[in-house]
Amino acid sequence: MTEPVMAPEALARLRDLERQVLWHACWMIHNANHIREKDDVKVGGHQASSASLVSILTALYFHVLRPEDRVAVKPHAAPVFHAIQYLMGNQTQDKLERFRGFGGAQSYPSRTKDVDDVDFSTGSVGLGVAITAFASIVQDYIAAKSWSKDRPAGRMVALVGDAELDEGNVYECLQEGWKHDLRNTWWVIDYNRQSLDGVVREGLWQRIEGIFTAFGWDVKVVKYGALQQAAFREPGGEALRRWIDACPNPLYSALTFQGGAAWRRRLTDEIGAEPGVAALLSARSDDELSDLMSHLGGHCLETLVHAFRSVDHDRPTVFVAYTVKGWGTPLAGHKDNHAGLMTKAQMETFRARIGVAEGREWEPFCAVPEPGALRDFLATVPFFARGTRRFTAPALPAPGPVFLDDRELSTQAGFGKILDRLAQRDDPLAGRIVTMAPDVTVSTNLGPWVNRRGLFSRDRRADTFRDERVPSAQKWEFGPAGQHIELGIAEMNLFLLLGAAGLSHALFGERLLPVGTVYDPFVARGLDALNYACYQDSRFMIVGTPSGVTLAPEGGAHQSIGSPLIGISQDGLASFEPAFLDELSVIVDWAFDYMQRDGAATHDARTWLRDQTGGSVYLRLTTRPLEQVALRREDPAFRQGVIDGAYWLRPPSPRSRVVVAYQGVVAPAALAAAGRLAGRHGDVAVLAITSADRLNAGWTAAQRARRHGSRQAISHVEQLLAGLSRAAGIVTVIDGHPATLGWLGAVGGHRTVSLGVEHFGQTGTVADLHAHFGIDAEAIVEAAEVLDAQGAG
């Protein structure tokens, strides 16, 4: 790099911003740990990890990025991000003063909790990196559709810690990106060569280069800053370059921490006798030599801008930017600096070097000599030119439930039929559904939908089997109009793609209704990414099947036990497990509306659920065909009960001494047991539970409201059980963990026995396994008789 990449005035302004951002990032952490009142738990804040990204973020946000670009900032650089947003007026001093405190700027950038313009939440390392690739695929998906608006394609940018590359989901994502011809994706690796507890292995950059090149990425190594490049052109400069390239990571870090005198001793001892080196070193003071050796490519604004500008294509690109962890601070280079904090004395030295007067620490431009010129410059920065960049999109009306008339069918097959019916419609909602599956498309009954709607790719691809006239039930065509995205066997990728597609309305201004299917036992494989998607308030439907031990011959690896508890505990996810097709039809129709809601977080006085906020939906379905029970599908009260979480299939009477409460595929056993118990044990009531999640959420919310003075607060489950005698007992049963329904007895103080599956499954028939785990009709009858005897005693 010999020619200037930008005007001197603009470069001067960027350097002012670099210094100002470094100050605010370090000061907000210092304030949180050493000045603000706190309890006895360390606040933390990663001053060193923040400092290593200051130059990169300055170059990107204030010069390179455009409004259509979307950015995931590595978690530990949150203070730098907040500082940048503060300078642009998108963050407040009050929240910076409360950084990592209640109501303050978040420890890691959060779409839902921060007030500044966060594109992607980060925090669970690796996931914020990978979601940018899937967001790019979603952007291409939208651009290919006839209904999309003409918007410029943005770059999906991730700022990545080098240690973050230890996360396996990053590499799963690379392979999926290669399959889908990924483009418009930049990853900038903060290659400071330090991890949480030490220094990374030698030669990591070569492994990075090899892996990314193999998957078609352009790899740009940004190693030397302008000062170093100029020094290399001096006599002795080539010897200095060779020494830098050969220097082990731990030694480079240690010398950086020790400073100019240590650099001089080491370089003099090892290469001082080579021609020109002595003069090169003697021409610089200790401070100047220290600046030279730490002026790596990742801390040189000219070098960074040149590297970013050099990309003249839309291929995915990774920048390996050499940096110093703790750059510009007294912590620079020390291997213990990951969680380290500047002492008060160190902060005063740092303050003096930056040039911030005491009492002016929070002023936006306290570290720059010409605030007016800097404000004028910021008014021209392209990335912020249009203000906040979060879009909205209108909700699409749900057309009403698609009811099926099959007399015997599984809910999984029923879901496939409902989607097939929707696929035959020419309405806006059907056009915005996008399905995806990790290699389980046919076995989760998405086949009919895909046959009608096709698979997505930017370019048309031939169906070779059809062209060769080979009979196949899957008449699948790939092309821009397709509405199914096929994935490899990686549940993390599924949930990351669902998360990206479920943010399409905010990221790209177009509404998508993402639907993913997965084997229910394998929901847990992608649980981190599922939680991450929900944390961002992404909107999607995940369909897990088969529930419980339904795949009895396949054994425990393909049987799900704890997934209902995931549905209950996961914030942002409404979980359902219907037994019958009419219930499923009502839930699916409601779910497409619920996924699009964005109302106030107020409780519904009828259920004490906060449904107007909307969210994502999880359906736990079964492959076991059930004989359908005549339900009141047109009755509004039935439909509302299904959505609220439960309804009486057989209501209690004053004579009822036993209630059988079930969820999901065990419905036939529950009904058979109730029939056998009737008469001898009074009028046996049957409670059909479609969502333990929503029943439990409403109940806990109502209890909380009553504690706070709202005595009229009564949840749906409390209303359902209000007429039941306190002497009655409840038997709960589910093909899943019994704790899913075990709390029901606490609602009204009823004696309860909870039946379910607590251990890894076995091979056998469904009947074998239901009997083995005690969730068949015989076990329900036995539990009910014990309860009734106890009540009579």
Image (tube, rainbow, N blue to C red):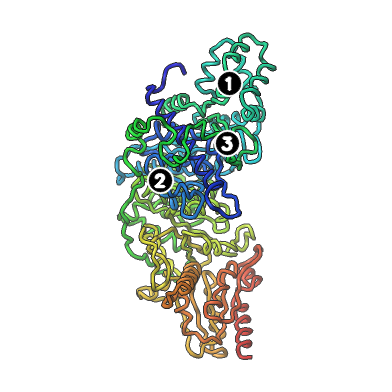
Could you tell which of marks 3 and 1 lies nearer the N-terminus?
A: 3
Whether tag 3 and tag 1 are in contact, CB under 8 A, the answer is: no
**Image position, residue 472 (x, y; %):** 46, 49
Between residue 181 and residue 163, name the one nearer to us.
Answer: 163
Q: Between marks 3 and 2, how big is the CA–CA gap?
A: 28 Å
Q: Nearer the viewer, residue 249 or 492?
A: 249
**Residue at horizontal 39 percent and vertical 42 percent from the top:** 139
Question: Does 540 sit above or below residue 724?
Answer: above
Q: Which residue is mark 3?
A: 162
| Amino acid marked by disc 1 | Leu
Name the residue located 47 percent from the left edge and 57 percent from the top edge. 542
Q: Quadrant of residue 211?
A: top right
Is 398 left or right of 631, judged from the image as shown?
A: left
Is residue 136 shown to the viewer in this render?
no
Image position of 312 with respect to 442: above or below:
above
The front one of 614 and 447 is 614
Q: Quadrant of the C terminus?
A: bottom right
Which residue is under mark 1? 289
Q: Secondary structure at mark 3?
A: helix
